[in-house]
Image (cartoon, rainbow, N blue to C red):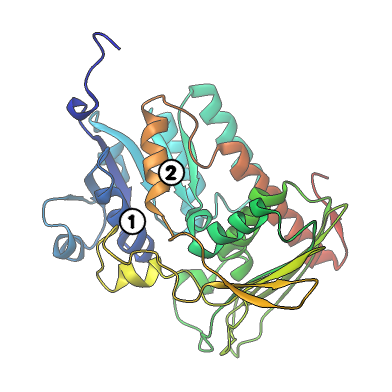
Amino acid sequence: MPGSPDAASIPPLNVAIVGYGNAGKTFHAPLITACPDLRLHAVVTTRPDALHADWPDVRAVPALETVLADPTIALIVLATPDALHAPQAQAALNAGKAVVVDKPFALTLDDARRLVELSEAKGLLLSVFQNRRWDADFLALQAELASGRLGEVVTVESRYDRHRPLVRDRWRENDGDGVWMDLGPHLVDQILTLFGRPEAITCDLAVQRPGGRTPDWAHAVLRYADKRVVLNASMVCAAPDVRFVVHGTKGSWLKSGLDVQEDQSKAGLVVGAPGWGVDPKPGTFVDGETGQRSRAPGPAGDYLAYYAGTASALRGEGPPPVTPRQALSVMEVLDAGLRSAASRREVLIGQ
């Protein structure tokens, strides 16, 4: 378009991360620095040495207020403990900043609703980092569904199991609703992305580890008019052999193993390097007529797509990859799950 600036001449947008624990170090910092349209400008942390060991040119600042007052920063990324998400997001929005919140969106549905209303009133980007939409296995499942060879899906099982039998002294295991609010947001968001909002949920939470202070096992059944979806998250599972099991009228799709991007980042692999996101354990398709099993590889995982989409949204080129209303829908299901577990009954979604 005549007179429009060349894309290459547009400077990257400055980003500040709040928190440099596992989420900030493993996910947000590497992905932001790999996105050409974004620049990691500052990190709020009490551990500047740890930050500078990884990113020596990034500013370390001691307080959230410092980055909120910086007019050069366009986006605040909250990689802090769950209880801080809502108040920090509110402060950032009130300071005129776009916000990305690590999951869960907030501790309560009411807090999440207030944040969405505030972002809409101010016309500011608000998004939740649902990176698991770009897991290799989930991208492969979407491709399977699009191909039509599964037929009409009637049953889905999605599991996120780990083997961490010893309770650790950290905030995530000391307070809150445990694994349901830790891993549940990923499981729920993926299913809502595929099938939309369920009619109801039945959820059970338990503490299985000696000395456990929060639920470390979660099992939920989502009721749809034409299908059932089973979600499971566990911290005591030495054989996490099932990630997805999908049964349709024409066939089934089976998947084991977790996406590799998190482990690759922890091992120091640069985002986008050869082999990044490639699934070493592709899924298996089972033909319903013949019973024949065949290897079903899918695309590589691509967490960078989240921040590429966020940068485009900040430039006014479309909605964020995870919209506030989508994030709110996840919170509605999580909240209904908590009420179901407390009452030991099925709870209708949205009521």
Check disc 2: other Cα within 10 Å, few if <14, some if 14-19, many if 20+: many
- Residue at the image point whose x is 25% and y is 60% from the top: 46
Residue toward you, 46 or 32: 32
Residue toward you, 343 or 254: 254
* Residue type, mark 2 in image: Val
Q: Between tags 2 and 1, which lies in front?
A: 2
Task: From this view, report whether residue 106 is shown above or below residue 158.
Answer: above
Residue 23 seen in this snapshot: yes
Badges 2 and 1: C-beta atoms under 8 Å apart?
Answer: no
- Residue 219 at what x, y percent from top left? 73, 72
Which circle marks residue 100 in the picture? 2
Would you say 44 lies left or right of 84 here? left
- Picture quadrant where residue 267 is located: bottom left
Residue toward you, 84 or 123: 123
Residue toward you, 200 or 149: 149
Quarter placement of the N terminus: top left
Residue 69 seen in this snapshot: no
Tell me the SS state at disc 1. Answer: loop
- Residue 131 at what x, y percent from top left? 47, 55
Q: Which residue is mark 1?
A: 19
* Residue type, mark 1 in image: Gly
- Residue at the image point whose x is 67% and y is 55% from the top: 145
- Residue 178 at what x, y percent from top left? 59, 70
Task: From this view, report whether residue 13 is shown above or below residue 296.
Answer: above
Distance in Å between CA atoms under marks 2 and 1: 13 Å
Quarter placement of the C terminus: top right
- Residue 271 at what x, y percent from top left? 29, 59
Q: Residue furthest top?
A: 2
Which circle marks residue 130 in the picture? none
Which one is earlier in the sequence, the residue at label 2 or at label 1?
1
- Residue at the image point whose x is 36% and y is 66% from the top: 22
Task: From this view, report whether residue 213 is shown above or below residue 144.
Answer: below
